Image (cartoon, rainbow, N blue to C red):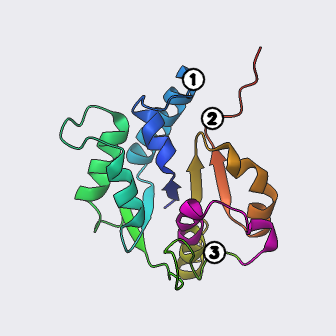
C-alpha cells in the first residue's frame, strides 16, 4: 500500500482557501485527496498529533463541505485504521518542539523551516520502520523547492502538486 504525508497547504488549497492557489492548483489538490481515498493509500501522521492538530486549525469539521475538510474528518474518524491512517512515532529533541531525531543532520537542510520538519521526520521514521518510502504532498510552499536536491540525497520523496506558475 502506498503511503503519503499531506502538507497542510494541500488541504487548505483543496478547500479553496489558499490565497495564491490558481484554479488548476485547487483542482489538483482536490483530485489528489480524492485519489488517496479512492485508491486506499494510507495517510501518515505523527503519533503526538502535531500534524492532525495543524490540520484541525485549517478546516471546518462541522460543515464538512470542502474536500480538505472531508479528508481530515476521515483521518480523525479512522486514525486507528491502518488502511486509512498510520500514526508514526517521531522523537522530539529537547528544545522548541520542532526538531526531531529523525530529521536529517545534513548541512543542506539546516535552514529548512522548523515548522515543516515534522513531515520530513515522519517520512524518514516510516521508511526506517516499514522499509518503504512515503511521498510528501506539497502544494504552495515554494521554500521546499530549494531543498529538493537535499531531499533526494536523504531519499525523501516530494510530490509538488502545483508547479510554479510564471507570470505571462
Where residue 33 appears, as percent x and y from the top left, is: 44, 42
- Quarter location, residue 108: bottom right
Where residue 116 appears, as percent x and y from the top left, is: 56, 60
Q: Which mark is residue 162?
A: 2
Q: Nearer the viewer, mark 3 or mark 2?
A: 3
Decide: is 83 above or below 19.
below
Residue at left offset 36%, top offset 44%: 58
| Label 2 close to label 1 by CB (< 8 Å) | yes
Horizontal side of 149 relative to 96 (left or right) equals right
Please state the extent of the stretch shown in magenta in the rendering.
Answer: 105-122
Where residue 13 appears, as percent x and y from the top left, is: 47, 35
**The residue positioned farthest toward the bottom in the image shown:** 94
The quarter of the rendered structure image containing the C terminus is: top right
SS for dot 1:
loop
Q: Is residue 134 visible?
A: no
Decide: is 156 above or below 103.
above
State the separation of the CA atoms marked 3 and 2: 25 Å
Q: Which mark is residue 128?
A: none
Which residue is tagged 3? 103
Q: Does 91 lie within the magenta span?
A: no
Which residue is tagged 1? 22
Q: Main secondary structure of the magenta part?
A: helix
Of 108 and 157, nearer the camera is 108
Q: Residues within 10 Å of mark 2 (few under 14, many from 20)?
A: many
- Quarter location, residue 21: top right
Residue at left offset 54%, top offset 32%: 28
Tell me which numbered mark, 3 or 2, is placed earlier along the sequence: 3
Amino acid at each position: 500500500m502506498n503511503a503519503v504525508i499531506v502538507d497542510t497547504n494541500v488541504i487548505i488549497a483543496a478547500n479553496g482557501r489558499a490565497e495564491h492557489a490558481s484554479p488548476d492548483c485547487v483542482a489538483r489538490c482536490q483530485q489528489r485527496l480524492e485519489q488517496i481515498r479512492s485508491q486506499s493509500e494510507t495517510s501518515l501522521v505523527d503519533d503526538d498529533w502535531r500534524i492532525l492538530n495543524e490540520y484541525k486549525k485549517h478546516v471546518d469539521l462541522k460543515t464538512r463541505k470542502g474536500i480538505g475538510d472531508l479528508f481530515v474528518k476521515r483521518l480523525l474518524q479512522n486514525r486507528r485504521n491502518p488502511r486509512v491512517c498510520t500514526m508514526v512515532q517521531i522523537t522530539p529533541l529537547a528544545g522548541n518542539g520542532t526538531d526531531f531525531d529523525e530529521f536529517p543532520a545534513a548541512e543542506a537542510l539546516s535552514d529548512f523551516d522548523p515548522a515543516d520538519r515534522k513531515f520530513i521526520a515522519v517520512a524518514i521514521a516510516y521508511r526506517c520502520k516499514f522499509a518503504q518510502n512515503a511521498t510528501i504532498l506539497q502544494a504552495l510552499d515554494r521554500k521546499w523547492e530549494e531543498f529538493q536536491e537535499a531531499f533526494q540525497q536523504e531519499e525523501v520523496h516530494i510530490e509538488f502538486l502545483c508547479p510554479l506558475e510564471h507570470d505571462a
